[in-house]
Image: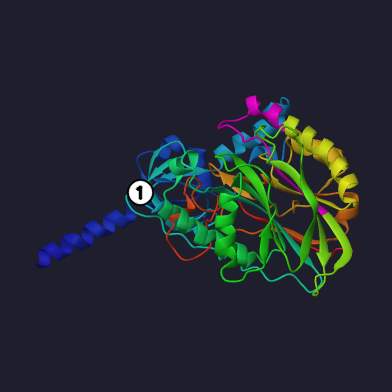
Amino acid sequence: MKKHIVLFILFSTLSVHAVERVSLAQLQGDWADYTGRTIELTDELTVCGSFYDSLVLAPERLFCPEERAMGLADGDSTMYREIVAANRAHSVCVHCNNAYYAVRVGDKVRGLRARVTGARQLLTGQSVKTKHGRVDKLAKPKKGELRIVGANIENYFADLGGYATKKTTPAQQELKTKKLVKALRAMHGDIYACCEMQVGDKAPRMLLKALNGNGGKYAYISLGLPDQDRIGGLFLYDSTRVRPIGEWMSAYRDSTSHYHSRIMAQGFEAIDRKGAPTGKKLIVSLSHYKSKRPGRGNYDTNEKRLANADSMLTMLPKAIAMYGDSDVLLLGDYNCYTQEAPIQKVIRAGYADMLPHGEAPDYSYTYKGEAGYLDRCFASPTMAGQIVRVRPWHVNADWYYQHAAYRMKDKTYHRYADHEPIIVDINLR
């Protein structure tokens, strides 16, 4: 018995000494030298991507190259290529046994032990312990402020017997609705500009019934289109705080166009406690540009997003004339990062990018380990000075990117969709 104990202690000691402590820089300096060896990384690393069987780790968050440089779809950019190379060089992929819903992008990892199996590839037969960051709660807007929310709510569909039923069952839809309603209430919005809502009235009525409960205050702008399995947009608003001005406007006259209910605008007027108009107005533009395809460059869909931008910019002067106000707030999922041509076209047209950039860049979406803004907030010159604060609320994008809301059967609003909502507080004059 004593002999077995001595052998066990000896074996354990040898196993500990067999693990070499190295920095990420040392490892990256010579992958071949470390291949086949078990190491412990001395760096604190950040989770940049969470997948079914692996994590992407780096010293800090990785950002999509198009956030900081002109992409290949808009020309040959040396800086773009340098960022692509740097993101790859400074990250590692760890194959592990983590439950994909238990790890979030932004989590911290210390003292990672794993076997080096190749360049940028590590293997561990167990779960990687991570330290979670907290999801901040949103404070209510201050007295006198209006809160406008731009939100991609990720395929909110009613059962119309087609595309929707292929995606979700009634039970799954109920779980998603509970999460979405909890999130909408937590945002304290006066106006919600929502992307990826099924066109027609069935899905909006279903959402509104859940949101209002017994005697709620929210209403929605009817698009006047028949119920159909097509992705569109939706305006929800607090009927005790604002009222719509006239009807909504589309950038596409043809109601059969795929974008007729995806690029639109609506005028709103603030009202007092008695429901009387205050004369304070704004126009909210909601856009959902053509989606990207997987891979770098996106040559085939870039031109469609440029056409979407042209159509939107043509619509806005008409909206200003129709609603009688120059205060325009542009929200939505533009499916473009900051340095891509469609975004730069909007900026050159005179609409200010209101999202936080600079030394501490933020994001609204993560994809394959890289973060960036796909969801936008622009303002006309007269609107920009009335915006008090703008920020994404980090409740969605840090979870596994293919993880549907209805699979996360907790009671929180986390991961009700795949994009972060953009929260805009306005002191409307």
**Measuring 50% from the left and 65% from the top, which residue is drawn there?**
412
Q: Is residue 285 magenta?
A: yes
According to the image, what is the colour scheme of the structure?
rainbow
Q: Is residue 100 magenta?
A: no
The range drawn in magenta is: 283-305
Which of 208/405 is in front? 208
Please, which residue is most extreme toward the left here?
1
Q: Amino acid at mark 1?
A: Thr
Kindly indicate the quadrant of the structure image that contains residue 257.
top right
Which of 372/301 is in front? 301
**Measuring 53% from the left and 43% from the top, which residue is drawn there?**
91
* Residue 41 visible in rendering: no
Provide residue 216's location: percent of width, then percent of height. 63, 69
Provide residue 286's location: percent of width, then percent of height. 73, 47
Kindly indicate the quadrant of the structure image that contains residue 1.
bottom left
What residue is disc 1 on? 124
The count of marks equals: 1
Label 1 sits on a secondary structure element that is loop
Provide residue 279's location: percent of width, then percent of height. 90, 63
Compared to residue 202, the image places residue 308 above or below, namely above
Residue 349 as seen in the image, left or right of residue 64: right
Which of 310/95 is in front? 310
Provide residue 399's location: percent of width, then percent of height. 51, 53
Residue 152 as seen in the image, left or right of residue 239: left
